[in-house]
Amino acid sequence: MNDAATFKVMGKVVMRRIGADRLLVPVSGDVAREGCVFPINATGEFIWNALAGGRTLAAAATTLAAEFDVAPETALADCREFAGKLLAQRLLAEVVG
C-alpha cells in the first residue's frame, strides 16, 4: 500500500460511541454476518473517518499530525498500521486505479 492509496468501506460500517468507548460496527456486508464489533480509540476514529471519507494515507497522516500534534512520520506510520488492520479485518478495501 502506498501513501497515495485511497480506500472504500466494505459493506456498511458505522462508528458508534458508547460512553468513552468507540466501536466500528459492520451492519452489512461479509463482516457483518460474523457479528463482530471493533473497538478503536480516538486516533483510530480520526483515521477511520479520514480513510472512509476518501482521503489518501498521506492526507490522513497530515491532518492527524496537525490534530494530535505528533511528528508527520509518526502520523504516517500510525495511518499505515491502522489501515493495514482495517484491510485485514475486511472493513476497508484499497481502491485500485
Image (cartoon, rainbow, N blue to C red):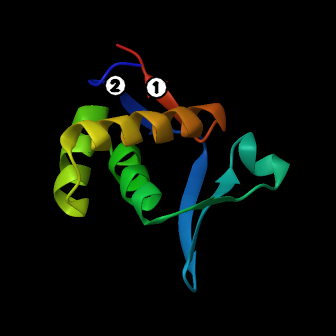
In the image, taking residue 25 as reference, residue 61 lies left or right, namely left
> What residue appears at the point 30 percent right and 41 percent down from the top-left corner?
74
Q: Nearer the viewer, residue 37 or 68?
A: 68
Mark 2 and mark 1 in contact? Answer it, CB < 8 Å: yes
Would you identify the image quadrant in which residue 14 lies? bottom right
- Image coords of residue 39 (percent x, y): 63, 62
> What residue appears at the point 29 percent right and 25 percent down from the top-left corner?
3
Would you identify the image quadrant in which residue 95 lies? top left
Amino acid type, residue under disc 1 in the picture: Glu
Q: Secondary structure at mark 1?
A: strand
**Residue identified by numbered label 2:** 5
In the image, taking residue 26 as reference, residue 75 lies left or right, namely left
- Residue sitting at the far right: 34
Calculate the distance from the C-alpha at mark 2 to the C-alpha at mark 1. Answer: 7 Å
In the image, taking residue 25 as reference, residue 73 lies left or right, namely left
**Residue identified by numbered label 1:** 94
Q: Nearer the viewer, residue 26 or 74?
A: 74
What crowding class fits label 1: few (fewer than 14 Cα within 10 Å), some (14-19), or many (20 or more)? some
Q: Nearer the viewer, residue 67 or 14?
A: 67
Please, is residue 84 above or below residue 68 in the view? Answer: above
Amino acid type, residue under disc 2 in the picture: Ala
Residue 64 is at least partly visible in this image? yes
**Which sits earlier in the primary sequence, circle 2 or circle 1?**
2
Residue 55 is at least partly visible in this image? no
